[in-house]
Amino acid sequence: MKLLIPPPVQAIICAGLMWLIAKQFPQFGFSVALQEPVAILICIFGIAIDLISVGLFAQKKTTVSPFSPNKTANLVTSGLYQFTRNPMYLGMVFILTGLGVWLGNFAAFLMVPCFIGYITKLQIIPEEEILLEKFGEDFGEYMLRVRRWI
């Protein structure tokens, strides 16, 4: 794998950078009605996606480790995995988006596409290559049927 830092830690780093950006560039701030409750709901939605996704991996008795996709015992294609091939990473994107709403700063949102691009290039694409090699046509058909993100 090209990524040496686990994706959840990458998301935490992005969250810290979002906070720093919001503090450094207050001129990009915004405030809307129900901002905090909406931010919390978006974060809860992201956490729920992550927990459900991990639970599906546990049910299939396969690894969730981002460092060892070659140890994957079974493909998980049910539940949330019917709609996105990467619900765990998608959950992290929702959490970062919720944080951006909570911070109320347009500039902070710049880290969300940075996280998506970084994780896609250094984690998801290498994972897909390994899974395609390991599961062949089954994974190839899954890739054709289900989008990488949403």
Image: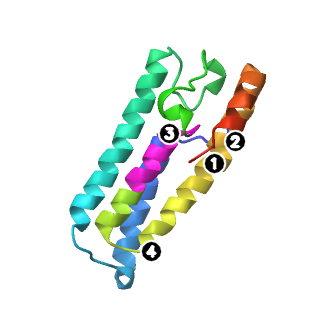
Q: Nearer the viewer, residue 139 or 73?
A: 139
- Does residue 132 belong to the magenta stretch? no
- Sequence-wise, the earlier of marks 3 and 1 is 3
Badge 4 local density, few (<14 within 10 Å), some, or many (20+)?
Answer: some
Q: Which residues are magenta?
A: 84-96
Residue occupied by mark 2: 125
- Sequence-wise, the earlier of marks 2 and 3 is 3
**Image marks 2 and 3: residues in contact by CB distance under 8 Å:** no
* In the image: residue 14, left or right of residue 42: right
- Is the residue 28 above or below the residue 129 in the image? below
- Is the residue 130 above or below the residue 50 in the image? above
- Sequence-wise, the earlier of marks 1 and 2 is 1
What's the distance in space between the residues labelled 4 and 2, CA to CA?
Answer: 27 Å
Residue 9 numbered tag: none
What kind of residue is marked 4?
Ala
**Image marks 1 and 2: residues in contact by CB distance under 8 Å:** yes
Residue occupied by mark 3: 87
**Judging from the image, what secondary structure is the residue with disc 3 in?**
helix
**At 42% from the left edge and 69% from the top edge, which residue is drawn?**
108
**Judging from the image, what secondary structure is the residue with disc 1 in?**
helix
> Is any atom of residue 136 visible in this view?
no
What kind of residue is marked 3?
Pro
* In the image: residue 41, left or right of residue 82: left
Rendered location of residue 125, percent (x, y): 69, 41
Residue 107 numbered tag: 4
Nearest to the eye among marks 2 and 3: give it: 3
**At 37% from the left edge and 85% from the top edge, which residue is drawn?**
27
